[in-house]
Amino acid sequence: MINRSSLIIRLTIALALSSFMFGVIYSKLYYKNVYAEELARSKTTIEQIGQTVSTTASIAAYLEDADLAVEVINGLISNDVILAAKINTEKHTLAKSVLFNEQPGNRFVLTHPFILSAQVGSIILVPNDVFIRQQASSIASDSVETLVLLIVPMLILFLSLAFFMITRPMTIVSKHLQEIPPGESLRLQAPKNHKNSEIGQVTKSVNFLLDKTQDLFQQERELRNAISVLEQRFRLMFERASTPTLLVRASGRIELANDAAQDLMLGLNVSAEETFPDCLMPLCRSPDALESLINDAVTNKQVKQLEIEFESALTHLPVWLNLVVIPTESDEGLYLQVFINDVSYRRNMINELKQKAQFDPLTGLNNRYGAELKLRFWLDNQIPFALLLIDLDKFKPVNDIYGHNAGDALLKHIATNLKECVRNDDVVARWGGDEFIVAVPHIARDGLEKIAEHIVSKTQQPLSFEKEGDSVQLKVSASVGISCFPEHADTLHELIEKADNAMYRVKMSSKNNFAFYQM
């Protein structure tokens, strides 16, 4: 913590430096302003000189009197702000000074002495820029020096007043404040001559805070006694809580287990006498995840939560538990508060909803949504795969002649045959109606052709169906279109479109066959 008196001194120094920097910046700005004003004044002086001699120069130009013109030139260059001058008639140069070297200058028109609308020549005045700048710089420097002579004493006086009226009294108050132990009855005394000043008001405010601090210390002592009583009551609440709760040392020893936790562990055939989470490890389907959960909570001292699947040692049924681990520091070391909730019912509901959302209820295959999830995962991870779009030939007559029950039975028959054509990790889905898709990752062209031939062959296998006591043979064929990622397209929509294009060519030609998409 920064010492209070040191902080006040720093503030005073910062104020002094700020004042100094302000003075420097202001002096520079003042110098530039005076310098600019002097340049502007010199420019005005040259214009006034030009206007003054224009009459005499006009007469010299009108009479073409070179002597008179020379006198005008000499009079002009005798002025310190004029470096060179030149008088022209309408036809030629009448006179010019020695230093005139056709350099640019201020040009004044010379009018006819009797006909004001007529011109008889011009006069060019070249300013003495070096002298003008030196003179402007000298005047500006003198002005700044005068300003500094006024500001510096004022700044010294200001800093002296700030030190003796603010810094020194505040340092005394700060030193006395550090000597007062918290909760004691000692109080600050206002510095001399500061009883009613702002420093005196600060002293009174600090004393007021010290009074409040002393009161708080007394209240803290009273609260300790109240906490002791509350601890007993909270312990009772912990033991009777409906949520299974454990209090575990960082070493894993279970210090406390409420009644609900003991019932849960009894149901899992686990003893609270064992260490946590070792007692649950033999039943856990993901022991590495459980161990990582505890290690992260202990290492990072952060609240961690995870749902993990276990197997009951008594019923051998899956049990899903939601574990919330809260690290808590105490004088005795690190403790873990572990809250355990049985979420098996909710998990089962989620799995049922997932099954309904991603699988076709008739065939048991993935539906369109379920297939899209897997295929988009392959696309996002740049996994090459082939997509086979399968459309059944002559399926509509089966429904029309033998009824929808026959059609449904045939679709289930086709689904079973399709699954036999591919591996377990491949995607087989009912895309809609009598359309199916098969997606196979990481496969060469010759292997893909064998799968397509197998699908065409298996689809033709007839199904015996009983209708009104008679057995009928239901038989269809398949037209298969094939597109590949990433050769043919890089989005699912385009892959389906390309496969559909290839399948349509099969439909229009021979049916009961397969074809690859052609670029």
Image (tube, helix red, strand yellow):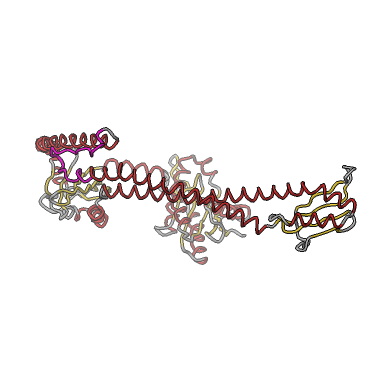
Q: Main secondary structure of the magenta part?
A: loop
Please tell me in which quadrant of the rendered image residue 499 appears.
bottom right
The residue located at (65%, 58%) in the rendering is 131
Relative to 212, 421 lies left or right: right
In x, y percent, where is residue 326?
22, 47
- Residue 230 visible? The answer is no
Q: Which residues are magenta?
A: 174-195
Residue pushed farthest top? 196
Relative to 376, 61 lies left or right: right
Q: Is residue 199 above or below residue 506?
A: above
In x, y percent, where is residue 181?
15, 43
Given residues 417 and 463, the one toward you in this image is 417
Total number of numbered discs in the rendering: 0
Relative to 381, 85 lies left or right: right
The residue located at (16%, 43%) in the rendering is 180
Q: Quadrant of the C terminus?
A: bottom right
Magenta stretch: residue 176 in it? yes
- Residue 202 visible? The answer is yes
Given residues 493 and 302, the one toward you in this image is 302
Q: Is residue 130 above or below residue 332?
A: below
In x, y percent, where is residue 345?
27, 41
In x, y percent, where is residue 255?
11, 48
Magenta stretch: residue 379 in it? no
